Amino acid sequence: MSGLRVAAACAGSARLERLREYLALAKFPLHLLVLATVACGYGLGSAERVSWAGLLGTLLGAGLTAFGAAAWNQFLEREPDARMRRTMNRPLPAGRIRPAEALVVGSLWALAGVGLLALVANAASAAIAAAIFLLYVGVYTPLKRISTLNTLVGAVPGALPPVLGWTAATGAPGHGAWSLFAILFVWQVPHLLAIAWYAREDFARAGFRMLSVMDADGRLTSRECLLFTLVLLPASMLPVVAGLGGALYIAVAVCAGLGLTAGAVRFVRERTPVQARRVFWGTLAYLPLVLLGLWLDWIFR
């Protein structure tokens, strides 16, 4: 019996380890924030009545599509990932998942996600999910080796999740959905530039054409970070124009925006990896705060 228990424990441990590898392939923690933007779009688009079953189905469909895109991205970038310290331990470059397996699993995730959205929501939201997948995998991923414009191009699929959520709830994107798109599009630029600066040596080894790789002293990168944090201040007011936000949201968005801008100013003055990381963490704090401000404003209005 003890031998059976040991065998069962080993099998359970192996399954758990396999689950961890698949979660890494899906970039699961990263996509929790993406799913929060989908939920925000769905809830705000639903006005006063949220279908919780519809929301859960939308989150599952959007999540599966995002997981599929992440798996395809890692399949296509497995060789440069192996040259980067921050990615060399991912399942593919480390050899814990085979490339063919990642491709099959990623394809199944994406197809299931788009299909589920068509089934539980509507064809328009499924089409947006498919567009996100194609833009991320077919345009942004290869462009990273070709042009520094990849940051702006990659911000498009990254900004579409709240539009997907809104469309799943209403059948079509409205002004409110596009106001959320604008915030996410602008927000992603300082977020990605900060990563690219403190990890610029890694990106150079991988052969990615990032602005930071060609910007030896960081002057241009830091100034672009500051520019886009300044643009984020008026962009964050678009939900107010669209009728989604009130005084509470304005206060939250302005305070969060000024805090992020202050970090970008310090990055301009001190172009160091430490300041770039602070901008990065500032962007990670900014988005949940702004989304929470919108939700609270909507709930207590």
Image: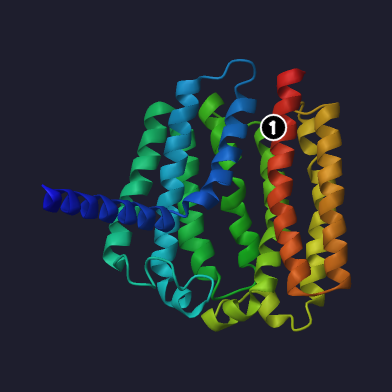
Circle 1 Cα neighbour tier, 10 Å, few/some/many (<14 / 14–19 / ≥20): many
From the top left corner, tell me how far across and down residue 188 is, in percent.
Answer: 68, 55
Q: Residue at x 42, y 34 (%)?
A: 117
Q: Nearer the viewer, residue 31 or 141?
A: 31
The three-letter code of the residue at mark 1 reads Gly
Q: Residue furthest front?
A: 2
* Callout count: 1
Q: Decide: is 159 above or below 59.
A: below
Q: Is residue 170 left or right of residue 250?
A: left
Q: Residue furthest top?
A: 49
Q: Quadrant of residue 209?
A: bottom right
The residue indicated by pointer 1 is 176
Q: Decide: is 35 above or below 198.
A: above
- Whether residue 211 is visible here, answered yes or no, is yes
How are the colours assigned in the image?
Answer: rainbow
Q: Decide: is 28 above or below 216.
A: above
Q: Is residue 213 left or right of residue 104?
A: right
Q: Is residue 201 left or right of residue 5?
A: right
From the top left corner, tell me how far across and down residue 285 is, in percent.
Answer: 71, 48
Q: Residue at x 27, y 61 (%)?
A: 101
Q: Work out which quarter of the rendered image holds the C terminus and state it.
A: top right
Q: Quadrant of residue 255?
A: top right
Query: Element at badge 1?
Result: helix
From the top left corner, tell me how far across and down residue 89 is, in percent.
Answer: 44, 70
- Whether residue 179 is visible here, answered yes or no, is no
From the top left corner, tell me how far across and down residue 82 is, in percent.
Answer: 44, 77
Q: Residue at x 65, y 35 (%)?
A: 177
Q: Nearer the viewer, residue 274 or 61?
A: 274
Q: Is residue 283 left or right of residue 61?
A: right
